[in-house]
Amino acid sequence: MSFYRRWIGGSGDLVRRYTSSIRDDAAIAEEVVRVMKAHVAHLVEIGAVPREAGEAILKALGEVDPSELLRGDFEDVHEALEKWLVDRLGPEVGGWVGLGRSRNDHVAAAIRLAALRRVGALREGVRRLRCVLAERAFQYADCAMPSFTHFQPAQVVTFGHYLLAVDELLAEFLHALSGVERLLLRSPLGAGPAGGVQTPVDRRRLGELAGFVEVVENTLYASGGRFFALALAGVVASFLAELSRVVDDFIRWNSPEFGYVEAPGEHISTSSIMPHKRNLVTLEVLRARAGEALGHYTALGAVVMKVGLGYSLDLQEATRHLWAVLDIAVEGVEVLRDFVEKMEFNCGRARAEAERFFTTSADTAERASLAGKPFRTAYFELAEAIKRGEAGLLPVEEALRRPALGSANPEEVRRAASRRLAFCRPGAL
């Protein structure tokens, strides 16, 4: 079914199916209705639409089920909504909604608002994960383990310190996400197809009615620009790439060769032929989907970069990749939170390996240097002693008592975890 283009002629199902975005528009249908409400309300405010007609349209918009709009054979949800209003109210009333707008500025607005909704869900998921990380970091503040550089045992840390490193990633992600949220809160409404509209809309007021706080001033960029989508997908995909490193650690530590992690049963699956296997399947899927998110980000950029500055139908093909990146992040954060909340860490085994693999050597050399010996001299003397099997290394507990801010010192870990937990108490935020 075509509403806007039926006058051209032709109704080939192949072309309609190929170019329609109606299925993908399920992601923005709710926001499309919201944007239309703001548009009509503003047209009534400025006297561009007869008040009686405008009020009838607003009443109908309050009754529409966005999911109903996705059932027809339309080009997109915008066409479906306008046709629904015309059929319900008649062309003399419903026909007013096309004034002073384009699908170009309305879809850009709906995408921004739908992205904000998803970002809110992601932010809440990250907040919950941070609270679990802080709780468990406090619990494991004294749980000594090797850190790893070059995939080799390195300096002794604690598992609590490791979990706070993950929390630091989440804190930086939220900081970056805040900057992108400010981009999303800029309204493209009133920009029309590219150069503005004749209707004397107050673009700032119109944006406020839809839930925005600023305006994208240039109308060509407002309707056709997709930097906000690239920026959001880029930040989230980059976060997932970094988070995947943590996921990979947990998968490796769940292996019997390490035996550091005891994964919760609901995250484990076994083999169809080897019943002894305990495969950490949820995190394996998360690791894979983090890679998929990078692929979706690349696809989004590949679509946008070949389209001149203005709207082309290519851009409707880009948006689904943004939703895929956000959905992967929302689900993945929730899975990781559940895992961290329920897993157990084998402190005895991790500590034994910290002692076995000389993970206090750097601290021992530093102590010797602080006592008056040039560091490199102390370093080489200790290296020779390790080779001979005669090294007198600092005990783990003593090595961990480093005074540096943010170190693996158990007292520092407990203080940092406590500060974070203060924001997790009911009513703290």
Image: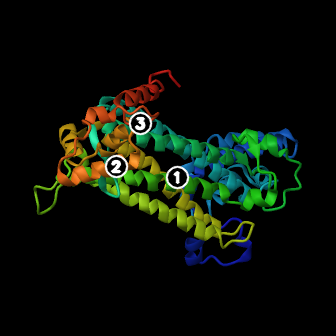
Q: Quadrant of residue 47?
A: top right
- Amino acid on which disc 2 is placed: Tyr
Q: Earlier in the sequence, mark 3 or mark 1?
A: 1
Is 163 or 389 nearer to us in this picture? Answer: 389
Where in the figure is residue 341, as x and y percent of width and height? 31, 36
Q: Is residue 184 visible?
A: yes
The answer to the question of whether label 3 and label 1 lie on touching residues, with beta carbons closer than 8 A, is no
Residue position marked by numbered label 2 in the rendering: 379
Q: Which one is in front in this view, the residue at disc 3 or the one at disc 1?
A: 3
Q: Earlier in the sequence, mark 1 or mark 2?
A: 1
At horizontal 40% and vertical 58% (from top left) the residue drawn is 289
Give me the disc on residue 236.
Answer: 1
Residue position marked by numbered label 3 in the rendering: 407
At horizontal 29% and vertical 32% (from top left) the residue drawn is 398
With 84 as the anchor, is 410 left or right in this view? left
The span from disc 1 to disc 2 (Cα, nearest Å) is: 42 Å
Give me the disc on residue 167.
Answer: none
